[in-house]
Amino acid sequence: MLDQELELRTNFDVAKPSALRVRPRRLRRTENLRALVRETRVRVDDLIYPLFVVHGKNVRDEISAMPGVFHLSLDQLEREIAQVSELNLRAVILFGLPETKDEWGSEDYAERGIVQDAIRACKRVNPDLVVMTDVCLCQYTSHGHCGVVRDGQIDNDATLEYLARTAVSHAAAGADMVAPSAMMDGQVGAIRAALDAQGFGDVSILAYAAKFASAFYGPFREAADSPPKFGDRRQYQMDPANAREALREVELDIAQGADMVMIKPALPYLDILRQTRDAFNHPIAAYNVSGEYAMLKAAAQNGWIDERKATLELLTSIKRAGADLILTYHAKEFAEWSASR
Ligand code: PBG
């Protein structure tokens, strides 16, 4: 009896308020205190907004698996760019859907291709907006692969010339940055050499350095009409299991002249973002891809999660893991929320 009483008293003494000197909760007491010690912030400046441009007039069709994301004809794109600029977003990345597809992806590098015209439209509305372009063949080829096909195989070295031509045509139309995403070996070096040779030494390269063969691109392939007609992309995109190889890819792209490197997708690869951040000093972008967006939207539409809080938490996790920049379909709504705060 006495022993028990003693023990109780001892425990009480240890837990006595005066004995507990370290209290992390002190700094969580009010929103102002929490804001003072907040380590990671997502800013409108960090976001890059992807846009899908199509031929035609007055087209603004919502992509079914990506609520809030649209196919835009050029007239609608101009309206969108005005809004995006009003919201102080600094950068967009353009994806185009061509009029016709062929084996060599001809519209990809056509002077009046959909993306080339879209770049000029963006610059007409806001010359200061950073206009980036995705450089890849998959939306433009009849077979839907990211490179040219020879004897049923994706021919790496033959593809480089097409990617370089595409990048140069985007630069000529006024793009500030090109982002090669085909995952062909040597694509960054080939594009850098071509840009420099054509007088576009100031156009920078955001390399999709570690791009994984991911199921989370599903909604994008509907949006961009780009699923491969045979096989899949695992002969060029990376195995989701490989982290060390991702670091090698980043290293190779930096050696070839990439100005910034990208990890894609974002959420299933936060560890890769952290390792890349620790190993390199280049700016790092993360692509918060279509499937990640679709999951969040679907849950929100069902009332299963708080959309705004969940979005902010996800974007924060991507920055905390080491990304400087985030390509995200949430960019516009995030900017709207920030403006209304
Ligand atoms: C083109 C490309 C893809 C994405 C960006 N560029 C699709 C793919 O590789 O199949 C995916 C973006 C997204 O899912 O949001 N190669």
Image (cartoon, helix red, strand yellow):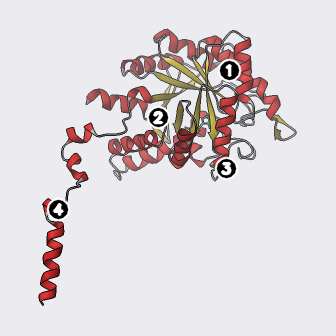
Tell which circle, 4 or 2, labels the residue nearer the N-terminal end: 4
The mark found on residue 329 in the picture is 2
Q: Is the CB of mark 1 within 8 Å of ligand 1?
A: no
Compute the Cα span from label 3 to label 4.
52 Å
Residue at 65% in and 48% down: 244
Is label 1 in a helix, a strand or a loop? Answer: helix
Is label 3 in a helix, a strand or a loop? Answer: loop
Q: Amino acid at mark 2?
A: Tyr
Q: Amino acid at mark 4?
A: Ala
Q: In the image, is 114 to the left or to the right of 320?
A: right
Is label 2 in a helix, a strand or a loop? Answer: loop
Q: Nearer the viewer, mark 2 or mark 3?
A: 3
Compute the Cα span from label 3 to label 1.
26 Å
Q: Is the CB of mark 2 within 8 Å of ligand 1?
A: yes
Tell which circle, 2 or 1, labels the residue nearer the N-terminal end: 1
Residue at 33% in and 44% down: 309
Q: Which of the 4 image quadrants contains residue 99?
A: top right
Q: Which of the 4 image quadrants contains residue 154?
A: top right
Q: Nearer the viewer, mark 3 or mark 4?
A: 4
Q: Nearer the viewer, mark 4 or mark 2?
A: 4
Q: Residue 235 appears at what percent x and percent y?
A: 75, 45
Compute the Cα span from label 4 to label 2.
50 Å
Is label 4 in a helix, a strand or a loop? Answer: helix
Tell which circle, 3 or 1, labels the residue nearer the N-terminal end: 1
Compute the Cα span from label 2 to label 3.
24 Å
Q: Quadrant of the N terminus?
A: bottom left
Circle 1 residue: 167
Circle 3 residue: 239
Tell which circle, 2 or 3, labels the residue nearer the N-terminal end: 3
The mark found on residue 19 in the picture is 4
Compute the Cα span from label 2 to label 1.
23 Å
Dot 1 crowding, Cα within 10 Å, few <14, some 14–19, many 20+: many
